Amino acid sequence: MARNRIPVSHVGSLVRTPKLIEFMQAIHEERPYDKAAFEACLKEAVHDVVRRQADAGVDIVSDGEYGKTGSWSRYIEPRLTGIVVRPLTEDEFKDPWMSPHGGRDRERFREFYTDYDNATGFSRRMGIRAIVNGPLKYVGQPLIQRDIANLKAAALKAKVEAFLPVVAPASALPYPTDEHYGNEEKILWALADALHHEYQAVVDAGLYVQVDDAFLPYMHEKMVPPKTLKQYLKWAEMRVAALNHALKGIPEERSRYHICWGSWNGPHVFDVPIRDILSLLMKIKVGAYSFEAANPRHGHEWKAWKTVKVPKGKALMPGVVTHSTNIVEHPELVAERLMHYASIVGKENVMAGTDCGFAQSPFARRVHPTIQWAKLEALAEGAKIASKRLWGKAKPKSKAPKAKAKPTRRAA
């Protein structure tokens, strides 16, 4: 893609179609369903969502994460051996480390979260535990190849580039029960080896790979206090090392890394400031960084990027529209936000993105579908405005005056 303007993309997850949700619900509840009809529905839905992204002005599209029958992170569990899943026990549910009820935000705003959980069913969805009871191996080749094939065909027809979101080691198994390895680091490295197969399959197919890692920043809220920031960073450094291991051999220019702070629609008062993790993020061997930058808790943090040296050739994809409100951002505000980042890293190193996905899972949307598309259109329009201001109008090539023909001498 020629870099004479700001490219437009997003984080990946989009609101599923009603028909697709019906199939996902049957799969989730382990009820019988017509597998051939599901595959046909999935293929059609991916083609439609890719076309709509292109129509909205998105340059690098996703499949909406439509092929994931679980959440953005738990989709990986059926693609790995060595994992069993069970509901949390009563004691585990009370444990602030394991429970979805843990964290300082929930302690301070207990009444809000009681209402929030009742309205969204968050606790019921998240009250499960992953147990590692054998060697972790990747067996998801048929599923990732299906997702790749659906997305490539749709992107080719729409004449756009495409990316697939995948999960990072820190977010795939954030706090597993270990019944096999006996060592936290061994689990991480085995998991990284397994995930590498999925990452490699995506880039081998000519797509961009996006590694999603909400848990890396989110776990600060659960750990600090009683732990210190230094102890949290040590925990995070091990996860970054595991991610780089999983990325070994993946071309940086074909990869990007996404973080958020859990990105549920809550107060987020105790999110780790991005300045505290910027130096750690710069160690991750990808070509672009995607992060929340539009919501009211993190909108001011563009200034923090002035304090770190972004390696040459790396791009920033700040979220300049957010999933956390149904208000559609004005394109002028989108452009203004993009200009902030361009002033720090240069106009050629900025992409227009979203804070997070517009759907948290197949069953949980964050905005109404009509608003999702309006936000993507505002994103594209804002990127056009910023591009015009940064690059200006292309100057017409000056035409050199034609040389006058020399008079010929007439024969005497």
Image (cartoon, rainbow, N blue to C red):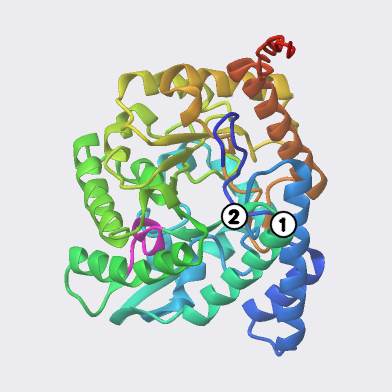
Q: Residues within 10 Å of mark 1 (few under 14, many from 20)?
A: many
> Residue at (60%, 44%) from the top-left corner?
10
**Is 174 part of what is drawn in magenta?**
yes
Could you tell me residue 247's position as x and y percent? 32, 58
The residue beneath circle 1 is 50
> Residue at (30%, 25%) from the top-left corner?
309
Q: Is residue 385 above or below residue 27?
A: above
State which quadrant residue 170 falls in: bottom left
Question: What's the magenta region?
Answer: 168-176
Which kind of residue does numbered mark 2 sit on?
Ala
Q: Nearer the viewer, residue 285 or 123?
A: 285
Could you tell me residue 76's position as x and y percent? 46, 70
> Residue at (49%, 28%) from the top-left corner?
348
**Is 225 part of what is drawn in magenta?**
no
Whether residue 29 sits left or right of residue 259 in the image: it is: right
- Label 2 element class: strand
In this view of the protein, can residue 14 be seen by the observer? yes
Residue 162 numbered mark, or none: 2
In this view of the protein, can residue 368 be seen by the observer? no
Could you tell me residue 57's position as x and y percent? 73, 41
Whether residue 189 sits left or right of residue 359 in the image: it is: left
User: Quadrant location of the C terminus?
Assistant: top right
Q: Is residue 357 above or below residue 80?
A: above
- Label 1 element class: helix
Tag count:
2
